Amino acid sequence: MTKDIKVYVNVPRAAGKVLAFADVVFAFAGEANGFRVNGLRVLESAKGLWVAMPSRKRTKPDKGGNEYEDVFHPVSAATRTLLFNAVLEAYESKQENPPADA
């Protein structure tokens, strides 16, 4: 089975904590077989760029408030590295070759 990862990066116009949003398509043996994950975020910290998984806010009464929970996450360190590298490469490529404004 062949696999492919395609990353679509959208850089917001306003500066803020989020440098870019990314959607990732995992294709297995062609575009029609796979799944898409929306809402990954490229952020910058003191240690450099990193990728945040899509998350949702959940009420946790036993913990005294709200907590954010990932709705998608890799199950191994190798998969996480593969995903993060693909997203960061797409982000850096977009930074080097920005689209022409209309």
Image (spheres, rainbow, N blue to C red):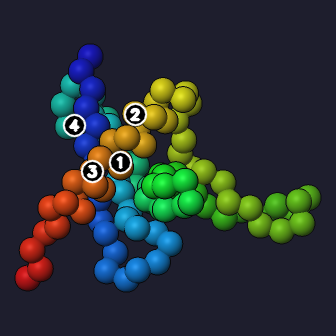
Q: In this view of the protein, can residue 39 be seen by the observer?
A: no
**Residue at image location 55% in from the left, 53% down from the top:** 47
Residue 83 occupies quadrant: top left
Q: CA distance from mark 1 to mark 2?
A: 9 Å
Dot 3 lies on which element? helix
In the image, what residue type sits under mark 2? Answer: Leu
- Residue 86 coordinates in the image, percent (x, y): 33, 42
Q: Amino acid at mark 4?
A: Ala
Residue for badge 2: 82
Q: Identity of the amino acid at label 3?
A: Ala
- Of badges 2 and 4, nearer the viewer stands 2
Q: Nearer the viewer, residue 15 or 40?
A: 15
x and y, in percent, of residue 4 in the image: 25, 32
Real-space CA distance between mark 3 and mark 4, rounded to the nearest whole angstrom = 22 Å
Q: Secondary structure at mark 2?
A: helix
Q: In the visual, does 52 lie left or right of 83?
A: right
Q: Where does label 4 land, which residue?
A: 32
On the image, numbered disc 3 is attached to which residue?
90
Point out which mark residue 87 bears.
1
Nearer the observer: mark 4 or 1; the answer is 1
Mark before the other along the chain sequence, 2 or 3: 2
Q: In the rendering, at what x and y percent does residue 43 appear? A: 48, 62
As measured in the structure, the alpha-carbon distance from the residue carrying label 4 to the one carrying label 1 is 21 Å
